[in-house]
Image (tube, helix red, strand yellow):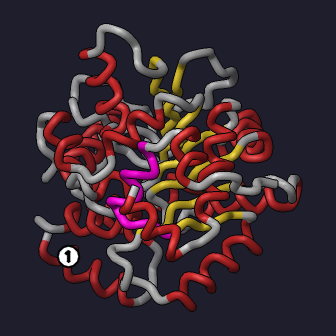
Amino acid sequence: MDVLKKAVARQPKLPRFLCHLYQRLNLKRLNLVTGAGISVDAGVPNWHGLLDRLAADKSPLKADLGKHRDAGLSPEYLGQIIYHRFRSRHPETEHAELRVATIEHGWGAAIHKAIYKKVPSNINEVVKAHPYLGELRDLARKVPLVINFNFDDILSDAIGEQIKRESNPSGNAMSVTWQPPLTDRPDLTTIYHVNGILPRISLRKRSPHIIFTEDSFANAQARAPGTNAEYLFLRFVQNTMLLIGHSLADSSLKNYLRLNRDKSPANHHYMIFWIRSERDISKSRRQDIFEANLELYNLVTIFLTSSEIEEGAGLDKVTVNRVWPKPSIH
């Protein structure tokens, strides 16, 4: 508890936030929204690191990519450039469908290789080395839905390994999908990969589409059935979301947060803002970020280090109330 008390000294309203989160958890109204940050400590690169790995073995592309990045091009646009170079290495043939299938298979394989290049092959090693994956895994098994923006399956792999080893269930069963689950099932956590999934073990089924490039994002927006958008919108309006590993760079995520603010102004969500240490970000900067996120997105920002995330994810509501009694929740 000493670790988390340092976070309370930094952010005095943290006990109130935690109690509200655990209240929503007990009511089955808490969902998780996970981003690239949860996988970085497992050896997965962030978006720019992934782009660099995809371009690493092609020296002209690597140099050009740096110049494009300096010019301010978005990661999605940079991904489009890399994909275009990759596709151009496969000449046009009379068998157009075979060419497309070959390109898409090779592109998925290239991304898979870049994602898992430095990830240990044994998921237990990943959990042991990660500062809070074990606690996040346990928390995920208490919620009905995890909206995952990552291509990797490290979180679901950790959950699956735990389920395989336990004789008596200590949490929900798990389902992994890249389609919106239209109903909740009791005692089931659904991990919904909104941008597609490339499992670490290649024999596992991958999604037919990987939303990685500028045109894939545009196509996804164009072809997304109304049920997809409506499903996510209702999730944000009717539940409390806890964002972990996000930098708010994803435009679709910001859109859902903004819609929630406009349609359900009393409903607030939470975001864990990772900091390396106490000195990583000044009090005035923390206040700027907190107030901007609250005003723009009804988003409460909680500033935590890795060890504080570990301890916070491992607490239950009883412990929170015992350490910080009568926390005044509204």
Q: Is residue 305 magenta?
A: yes
Residue interval drawn in magenta = 303-314
For mark 1, does the 10 Å Cα neighbourhood hold few (<14), some (14 to 19), or many (20 or more) residues? some
Q: Amino acid at mark 1?
A: Lys
Q: Is residue 276 left or right of residue 53?
A: right
| Residue drawn at 49 percent across, 61 percent down | 246
* Quadrant for the C terminus in the image: bottom right
* Quadrant for the N terminus in the image: bottom left
Question: In the figure, 152 relative to 178: above or below?
Answer: below
Residue 208 seen from this side: yes
116 or 300: which is nearer to us? Answer: 300
Q: Is residue 212 left or right of residue 63?
A: right
Please state the horizontal and vertical placement of residue 300, each as a whole percent of the image: 66, 64
Q: Is residue 175 left or right of residue 198?
A: right
Please state the horizontal and vertical placement of residue 39, each as a whole percent of the image: 32, 52
For mark 1, what is the residue? 62
